[in-house]
Amino acid sequence: MIGNLIYDYCRELFYINRSITGNGVRETLKSISKKVNNFQINEVPSGTKCFDWKVPKEWNVNDAFIADEKGNKIIDFKDNNIHLVGYSKAVDKVVSYNELMNKLYTIPEMPNVIPYITSYYSEDWGFCVTENQKNNLKKQNYHVKIDSSLKNGSLTYGEVLIKGESKKEIIFSTYICHPSLANDNLSGPVLATYLAMYLQKIKKLRFSYRFIFIPETIGAIAYLNKNLNNLKKNTYAGFILTCVGDNNNYSYLSSRNGDNICDIAALHVLNYSKVQYKKYSFLDRGSDERQYSSPGIDLPFCSVMRSKYGEFDEYHTSLDNLDFVSPEGFEGSYNMHKKIIDLFECNFKYKSIILAEPQLGKRGLYPNKSTKKSHEKVRDMMNLISYSDGKKSLLEIANEIKVPIWDLSLLASKLIEHKILKKV
Ligand code: ZN
């Protein structure tokens, strides 16, 4: 089962300390490069101006803990890397109980859960702990040590282009900046890895496929800053891969206009896969579509997720762990995105070769016995022929006659064999 392979890979990468920059990102990308051929890892130096932003300093952590007066480590980054506020500066000092309280973050209504907090753009430090851990702290001094570095380095991202016959690209973009958090969003990079591996096994592709692995927001901005012209020229459809590992109902977040080919494809696949899903509009956006689809950039991106970020209780907490995602969840997302890919690969235009209706019977295409099912099949075939004017795409016809494109594609192949249709 492919879901098991993706889940296992998620577990393998789970404990790496990722952020928007740093060695955790490099280690993650290096691992992906061992699975995906021609994988490029790029570095953008700190301080590089990207539109309205600047690439921040690079952050790395060796160790971080809070110890009591006896030297016992009460909170340890080594137990869970989300204990440390992301981008915490180096600290090595004794602090009072009250001072420490101001530097601890909890979720009071979830007393056994660690929140995930970052402070990318204002130099600070802090620890994320459970409400119970905080309440158990005695009134004494504590030794706080954060052995981290925040200095000029670079932002690291990865990408791979899998070339097809057309220069037009279908883009899958995912973010690699979250530490030990499974659904949001290690699920994205591991699914992207396996989708890229799937595509690299196919000998002849119609479209080109680009997979982008970037830190969220600043990575998308840096990537666009560098590649905008190419993206504007070649992007056919784009998808953000995020929150694709849990086994709850699906979610769909539309592109800004909601009527791009990415939306039409995603909705077709969701509707004909007989799954439950919730529709979100661009008003509910929260990931890199914020950059890709901003005015002037105008790239068509939507997302097909399981539980949407911000909408599940485990989101940005220690509960978004390897128990929250599952092989079944990954399997479903993999198949859903594979169907989207397959849809683009088969979405040709066809033209009927025969004037007036073809006689199906003499070609053996008319069933001998008339049942409800065979009747439907003939109706679909006749509809496909009748709409194949060389102008409408198979997807347009599929939506018009309310048949899944994958069924119609098989019918089209059969009609080509019988010299009734031709590809245009
Ligand atoms: Zn997030």
Image: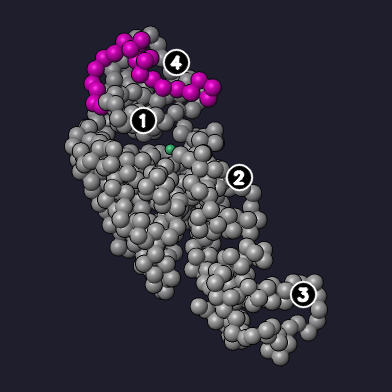
Question: In percent of the image, x 50 and y 58: which residue is there?
Answer: 261
Tell me the SS state at disc 1.
loop
**What residue sits right under mark 1 in the picture?**
118
Numbered disc in front, either 1 or 4: 1
Tell me the SS state at disc 4.
loop
Q: Amino acid at mark 4?
A: Asn
**Which one is earlier in the sequence, the residue at label 4 or at label 3?**
4
**What residue sits right under mark 3 in the picture?**
375
Q: Label 2, label 4: how many angstroms apart (C-alpha)?
A: 41 Å
Percent from the top left, x then y, of residue 143? Answer: 28, 17
Tell me the SS state at disc 2.
strand
Q: Quadrant of ligand 1?
A: top left
Tell me the SS state at disc 3.
helix
Mark 1 crowdedness (10 Å alpha carbons): few <14, some 14-19, many ≥20: some
Q: Which mark is residue 278?
A: 2
**Which one is earlier in the sequence, the residue at label 3 or at label 2?**
2
Q: Label 1, label 2: how many angstroms apart (C-alpha)?
A: 29 Å
